[in-house]
Image: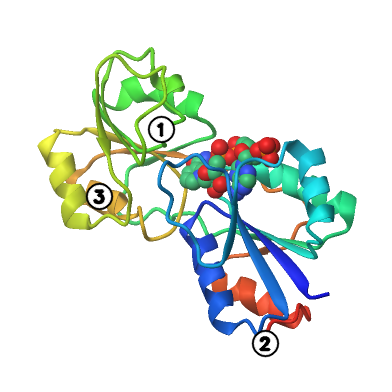
Amino acid sequence: MPDRLLILGGTSDARALAELLTLTNDRALSVVSSLAGRVRSPRLPPGEVRVGGFGGIAGLVAYLRDEGITRVVDATHPFAAGMTANAAAACARTGVPLTILRRPGWTAQPGDRWHRVASLAEAADILPRLGARVFLTTGRQDLAAFADLDLWFLVRSVDPPDPPVPRRMRSILARGPFTVDGETALLREHAVDVLVTKDSGGMDTAAKLTAARPLGVPVVMIDRPALPPGVPVVETPEQAAANLRESGSGLR
Ligand code: NAP
């Protein structure tokens, strides 16, 4: 029986890992990527893909057993804390080795005016003290925390925002990567005076931070949830692939 790897995805890093393994795999390692199914037309990774939740920890335990999964890489978004916790619990229960692939968070540069907060609720709390025209980039599922604020919001998301949404809002649908020129033009066009983002890390969505700096636009940076203890973490798809290679997964 070949080793069988489950990649928990929904990120560009998960796709990059699937691509890397497709290029270097000699078929001794079979790979399946999993997506939650939230995005209407997702960018699919190459190779085998399954879509939809597993049904909690018990469902994931059953899936790992039924599919003969021998390794799991959790390459979900840094804020997909529920999936990450379930993966840690299910892998502990089945003895399947788990690695977390998580790109590093962003670091403030000279000139940045960042306010680090621990949650969406805390972000909503400090916003009225920082500005009145908000660029909100936390994703379509996370608007409820801001719905009662009497501020104007420019909301960017891949799919249309889920209610409840702020009363005064303009929605734009777009998917990264974004450019500094594009982000600068957007901030200027809408006279944005404060930006809200999760500390997602990575290059695809970092341009907004570079654009905010010279314009003096403050940034509310929402910190990442904690990782489950004791699970090894790598930062890049290349490191994840090297890890699989070293652990004798059948990957050359
Ligand atoms: P979450 O709150 O951690 O997960 C909620 C539930 O969604 C999980 O318990 C699981 O359902 C299902 N799920 C999540 N990721 C899955 C995957 N890769 N494959 C199969 N089922 C999955 O997750 P979320 O924050 O809603 O994120 C959903 C997806 O969007 C993730 O794949 C994530 O990588 C991606 N994403 C999230 C964000 C964000 O800001 N949260 C941003 C960009 C992309 P069951 O319990 O039924 O198994």
Q: Is residue 166 visible?
A: yes
Residue type (three-letter) at the residue carrying disc 3: Arg
What's the residue type where badge 1 is placed? Answer: Arg
Q: Secondary structure at mark 2?
A: loop
**View extreme (left): residue:** 189
The image quadrant where one finds the N terminus is bottom right
Judging by the rendered image, the residue that carries numbered circle 3 is: 213
Q: Earlier in the sequence, mark 1 or mark 3?
A: 1
Quarter of the rendered image showing ligand 1: top right
Q: Nearer the viewer, residue 206 or 32?
A: 32
Q: Position of residue 65 (x, y in %)?
A: 84, 54
> Where is mark 2, residue-wise?
252
Foreground mark, 1 or 2, reads: 2
x, y percent for residue 113: 32, 43
**Residue that carries the numbered disc 1 in the rendered image:** 140
Label 3 CB, ligand 1: below 8 Å? no
Q: Is residue 106 above or below residue 28?
A: above
- The answer to which quarter of the image holds residue 98 is bottom right
| Alpha carbons under labels 1 and 2: distance apart | 40 Å
Amino acid type at circle 2 is: Arg
Q: Where does the image place residue 118, in percent across and percent down from the top left?
A: 54, 34
What residue is at 30 percent from the left and 38 percent from the top?
Answer: 218
Disc 1 vs disc 3: Cβ atoms closer than 8 Å? no
Q: Position of residue 252 (x, y in %)?
A: 67, 87
